[in-house]
Amino acid sequence: MSDSKTNMVAPPEGVTGEGFFATKLNDVVGLARANSLWPLPFATSCCGIEFMATMASHYDLARFGSERVSFSPRQADMLMVMGTISKKMAPILRQVYEQMAEPRWVISVGACACSGGVFDTYSVLQGIDKVIPVDVYVPGCPPRPEQIVEGVMQLQELVKNESVRRRNSPEYKELLASYNL
Amino acid sequence: MALETAYIQEKLTQKFGNKVLNFAMNRDIFSFEATPDAIHEVIRTLKVDEDLNFHFLTDLCGVHYPDNDSQHLFAVVYHLHNWVENVRVRVTTYLTDENLEVNSITDLFLCSNWMERETFDFYGINFIGHPQLKRILNMEEMVSFPMRKEFPMEDSGRTDKDDRFFGRTAQNL
């Protein structure tokens, strides 16, 4: 037997009895979603290199249930935008976001994706939140893998606490409408 | 015998007269001007003449000189290279604001296709006879020519460069 201890995710709050466990559907769905976020890396520059380190053995994003990097937007839950997005690239990013199935989340990694960074110029999109809604911003130029992992963990908190009905709510529809999505 | 700059000058002056001018060594490259109506023929001569043999187009680009007089506001610069003799020349043609067009040299050098598109993209210089003169690097919806000096460098959509956040306002309000 190996001595390694497996870290299991703690169960949500609920009532335990003999042979049963009762909890809220929201919590169970949230738990399942949060621990199997399939990332879609949209890496356009140096933040993408940091993401490669994040996925590799040393930092190992797989520990958080994100080992399955999806290169098809249709099977991804979490769009990770890493790097400078030029204005010419913006419609493509938007199309990728549109192709993702609900529920979908977006992490904006690095200064360029968050605000344009040092590229305050005619050709660069001044933050991806100009074209798609963003859930978590990771600052840094580029951020260290720890920061990217922290961003993913922050997103996991959001996902855990999200109501299963949020995507049907008028607020959410209004948010998408504000982006013409 | 190496290809002498005096020989190039003599050969071109003989053929084009006062349409080629201002011959000079400029930063180690032999440079001269050609008028826009003659530039295509000058480059063709440089390429096909057996003695000159400038068969390689290194670069083609535009320049905007907003402070120059109205006859020298824009320039198109051609860099040519003779690989056999290892000699380079720089040919400049100046364009006016009203008549911002020059003959395309895509029939002489295929590689000039993208370079002319790029020059059009950034300066709005029209290359007559170009097979597909449309934007190459910038997004197609763009209406301005961003490398012209009157065009602002910073993006107007920037929202986080607020002076309040940098302590640049008096009361930091």
Image: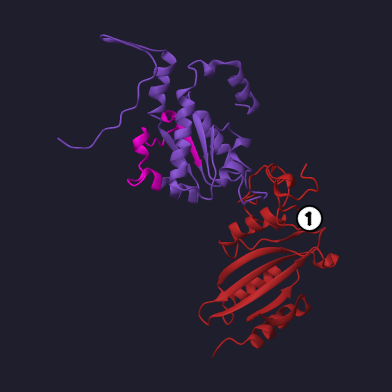
Chain colours: A purple, B red
Nearer-the-camera pick, B159 or B81: B159
Residue at the spot 61% in from the left edge and 16% down from the top edge = A170
Residue appearing at x 62%, y 75% in the figure: B46
A99 and B136: which one is in front? Answer: A99
Residue lying at the far right in this picture: please name it: B69
Residue bearing mark 1: B150
Q: Nearer the viewer, residue A52 or B81?
A: A52
Q: Is residue A1 shown to the viewer in this render?
A: yes
Residue A93 in magenta stretch: no
Q: Quadrant of residue B50?
A: bottom right
**x 44%, y 36%: residue:** A40
Q: Does A62 lie within the magenta span?
A: yes
Helix, strand or loop at disc 1? loop
Q: Amino acid at mark 1?
A: Glu
Q: Give the magenta part as a residue range.
A: A53-81
- Compared across the picture, whether B104 is left or right of A168 comes to right
**Residue B161: image location, x then y, percent:** 70, 46
Point out residue A46 in the picture as x, y percentages from the top left corner. Answer: 49, 51
Q: Mark 1, residues whose alpha carbon is within 10 Å: few (<14), some, or many (≥20)?
A: few
Q: Is residue B45 above or below residue A89?
A: below
The quadrant of the picture occupied by the N terminus of chain A is top left
Residue with the most extreme bottom position: B1
Give the x, y percent position of residue B49: 60, 78
Q: Quadrant of the C terminus of chain A?
A: top right
Image mark 1: chain? B
Quadrant of the rendered image containing residue B140:
top right
